[in-house]
Image (cartoon, rainbow, N blue to C red):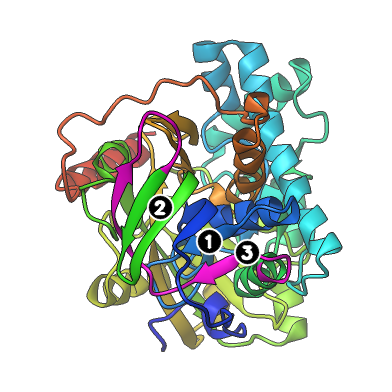
Amino acid sequence: MKLDSYWTDSAPAFLAAPQELPAQVDVAIVGGGFTGLSAALTMAKRGARVAVLEAGPRVAAEASGRNGGHVNNGLAVDYADVAAKVGVERARGWYNAYDDAVDTVARLVRDEAIDCDFMRHGKLKLATRANQMAALERSAQRLVDDGVDSDVEILDASRVRAEVQSERFHGGLLYKRSAQMHMGRFAHGLAAAAQRNGAAIHTGTEVRRIERLGQGHAHRLHTARGVVTAQQVLLATGATRHGGYGSFGWLRRRIVPIGSFIVVTEPLGAERAQALLAARRTYTTIANIHHYFRLTADHRLVFGGRARFAISSPQSDAASGDILRAGLAETFPQLGAVRLDYCWGGLVDMTQDRLPHAGERDGLYYAMGYSGHGTQMSVHMGERMAAVMNGDAAANPWQGRDWPAIPGHFGPPWFLPAVGFYYRLKDRLA
C-alpha cells in the first residue's frame, strides 16, 4: 500500500518551464494549488506578468491534490443555521456561490480541454440513523422555500439502497448540481493552461518573508531562490505549514489545519463497482466524524473521513488507514479483504465558522479557509480574486466578513485531540 495520493500518483507530473526568478512582476501568487493556478490563468490571460511561487516540488500537491475528488455544491454547514445568523439573502448568496463554483470548474474543463474525468452526477448526503432523516427533510424544504435550490430531492431508504449497496443508510438528500473529477489530471491541465497563457510557475520557491513597500499593494517577497518585487500579491496558501508564523502569522491564527484521511482500493472491475455504487455520485454521511466516498474511472473505491483529529504524517496516515479500513468494512462488508492500494492524509484549512474567507489586509490579497469544501471554491476564488485585483471589488462573494483569531491558537493546533473527543461524543449522543 502506497502512502501517497492516488490523484498525484496516477497523473502526469506538471513540468514547469525552467526559468530564472524574475526581479519584478505585476502579480506574485503565493501557493500553487487550485486557487493560485486559477488566479494565474485569469491574470495571465489579461496580459499581466504573473509569477506563481510554490514552496513544494510540484503544483497542487497539498490540499488540491490530497482530497476526496468531490466537486460539490452546497455549504459546508447547514444552510438554515447560516440563514439564522446572517439572514436569508446573504446565506442564499453564499450557497449560490458554490453553484457558481461548480460551474466555473465545468467551464475550465471544457474551455481548456482538460482530460480529468469530470462528471456531474450529483452528491448524496446519507443518513446513518433513522432520526437524521427529519433534519435532512427540513434542510431540503428550507432550500426550496427560500428559493435557494429547487433541484434537491429526498431519497428514502429503498431508493438509496437501489444505488448504494449497503444496509447502513436510512435515506439521503440529493444535491443534483454536484460533480467529481480526477484531481491530479485537473491540476496538470490547469497549470499547463496558466503556463501556456504566459504565467511563470516556480516550484521549490518557498516564500519566507513578505515586506510591504509603502502604503499601497507593492511588496518585496523574499524566497528560497531570491527576491521578487510585485505590484500585487495574492496569498493562496491554505493550511500549508511553509513560511512559519512570520509574515503569515495573522492568517495562521485564523486557520486550524485538521487532517483528513483517505484510502483507495485496488480496481474492483466494472461490474463489481457498478453494483456497489450504481449512480456513481459523490457520497457523504452527515455525522461530525463522517465518511465520504466515490468511484474512480478505473473502478476503484475512494473512501475517506476524519479518521483521527491529527496532523497528516506517514505514521498518522498509516494509523488512520487502519481506522478507515474498519469503516469501509462496516459500510461495504461484501468487499471482504479488498486490497488497499493507496492511503494518504491531507490538511483541511478549517475556519471557526467553516466558511471561506477572502479579501485584503495590509495591502495583501488572500483567499483560503475552504474548510473541507474547497475543490470547487478554490478554483472559483482564484478567478474571483483576479477580478478583485483588477478593480472589481464586488466579484468577491465573501467580501466584508469579520475574521477574528481563534482563541488560544498561536502555533501548532495542540487542542485537536479535545476537539475530536467533543465531536465523537456529539455523534454518540445524537
Q: Which residue is mark 3?
A: 199
What is the x, y in percent for residue 198?
A: 68, 66
Q: Report the label total.
A: 3
Q: Earlier in the sequence, mark 3 or mark 2?
A: 3
Closer mark to the observer between disc 3 and disc 2: 3
Q: Which quadrant of the view contains residue 252? A: top left
Task: Verify CB contact (< 8 Å) between mark 1 and mark 3.
Answer: yes
Residue at (74%, 16%) from the top-left corner? 146
**Nearer-the-camera pick, 250 or 317:** 250
Q: Which residue is mark 1?
A: 51
**SS for callout 1:** strand
Residue at (27%, 29%) from the top-left corner? 405
Q: Earlier in the sequence, mark 1 or mark 2?
A: 1
Q: Amino acid at mark 3?
A: Ala
Instruction: Compute the Cα span from label 3 to label 2.
Output: 27 Å
Q: Which residue is mark 2?
A: 348
Q: Earlier in the sequence, mark 1 or mark 3?
A: 1
Q: Amino acid at mark 1?
A: Ala
**SS for callout 3:** loop
Q: Amino acid at mark 2?
A: Val
**Nearer-the-camera pick, 311 or 29:** 29
Please tell me how crowded label 2 is: few (under 14), some (14-19), or many (20+) other residues with Cα within 10 Å. Answer: many
Instruction: Compute the Cα span from label 1 to label 2.
Output: 25 Å
Instruction: Compute the Cα span from label 1 to label 3.
Output: 6 Å
Residue at (58%, 58%) from the top-left corner? 50
In the displayed structure, would residue 424 be above or below residue 86? below
The range drawn in magenta is 195-218
Residue at (60%, 40%) from the top-left corner? 385
